[in-house]
């Protein structure tokens, strides 16, 4: 996996033991504590701004007039890009701090709500043409309830466009650190990294699962997979981040899906 590198807003990562969060899980994934620093990095770094977000937008295609739910919208960067392309967008996130920044970006009229993916969501059945789930599903141990809710809110034939940590990349991180025993590719495994960004340090804990488990979760929730993608970065990344691209010209960082509600 490629770390986010930008001169002003780098996110450095360090793999930590699962025991680092076992005593007090509330210390992990507290985006409120570093919302501004993370947002600044997300706006300009290689992995988010020049790889993951362009890939999500490319998979979404022409969204003009489509009603889209941004699940786990964070500070609203993908929300804003979709809206700029003519979509009618709603969004939610578990972090009130991130949504405060989203409101500053999107305006008070934006449809934003604080709620958790995986819990019952405050939207009617058959509401959205598309749901985008950008780097959010991998925070859940059990995808079943979340996918059932997203399926419920999609119109028949609607799309779920999702990005998650690439399971092989996560396995590779552990192997390169000599900690392969902590992350068997074929298991669903919790793993934790320490992020340092903008002078803030935070623990980020996610769940890694093999590709076959992802496929089973999607199809079990009533989705049909139409695209599995391992894209290249945006061409502009070669000029913006020449050293990083030269060091690792082929990305294996995230896995992207387009799924259709049957």
Image: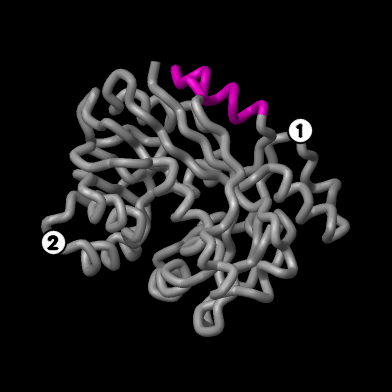
Q: Name the disc covering residue 108, or none.
A: 2
> Residue at horizontal 23%, vertical 37%?
66
Would you say the magenta stretch is mainly helix, strand or loop?
Answer: helix
In the rendered view, would you say 138 is above or below 106? above
Q: In this rendering, does residue 227 appear at all?
A: yes
In the rendered view, would you say 123 is above or below 58? above
Q: Nearer the viewer, residue 223 or 66?
A: 66
Q: Which residue is mark 1?
A: 186
In the rendered view, would you say 192 is above or below 129? below
Left or right, residue 46 beside residue 61: right
Which residue ends up furthest to the left in the rendered image? 109
Quadrant (top left/top right/bottom left/bottom right) for the C terminus: top left
Q: Where does the magenta region start and end?
A: 212-225
Q: Residues within 10 Å of mark 1 (few under 14, many from 20)?
A: some
Determine whether the residue tagged by mark 1 lies in a helix, strand or loop.
Answer: loop
**Residue 79 shown in magenta:** no
**Percent coordinates x, y for residue 9 in the rendering:** 51, 79
In the rendered view, would you say 246 is above or below 144? below
Determine whether the residue tagged by mark 2 lies in a helix, strand or loop.
Answer: loop
Residue 62 found in image quarter: top left
Left or right, residue 231 beside residue 107: right
Numbered label tally: 2
């Amino acid at each position: 996996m490629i770390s986010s590198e930008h001169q002003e807003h780098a996110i450095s990562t360090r793999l930590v033991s699962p025991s680092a969060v076992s005593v007090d899980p509330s210390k992990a994934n507290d985006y409120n504590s570093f919302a501004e620093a993370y947002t600044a990095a997300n706006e300009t770094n290689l992995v988010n701004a020049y790889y993951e977000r362009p890939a999500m937008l490319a998979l979404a295609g022409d969204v003009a007039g489509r009603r889209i739910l941004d699940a786990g919208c964070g500070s609203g960067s993908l929300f804003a890009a979709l809206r700029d392309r003519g979509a009618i967008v709603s969004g939610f996130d578990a972090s009130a701090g991130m949504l405060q920044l989203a409101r500053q970006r999107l305006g008070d009229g934006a449809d934003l709500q604080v709620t958790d993916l995986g819990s019952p969501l405050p939207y009617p059945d058959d509401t959205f043409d598309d749901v985008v789930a950008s780097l959010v599903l991998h925070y859940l141990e059990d995808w079943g309830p979340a996918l059932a809710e997203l399926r419920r809110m999609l119109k028949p034939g609607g799309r779920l466009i999702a990005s998650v940590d690439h399971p092989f990349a996560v396995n590779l991180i552990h192997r390169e650190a000599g900690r392969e025993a902590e992350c068997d590719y074929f298991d669903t495994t919790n793993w934790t990294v320490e992020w340092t960004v903008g002078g803030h340090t935070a623990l980020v804990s996610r769940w890694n699962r093999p590709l076959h488990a992802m496929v089973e979760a999607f199809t079990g929730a009533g989705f049909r997979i139409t695209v599995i993608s391992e894209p290249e970065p945006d061409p502009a990344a070669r000029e913006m981040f020449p050293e990083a691209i030269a060091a690792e010209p082929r990305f294996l960082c995230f896995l992207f899906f387009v799924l259709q509600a049957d």
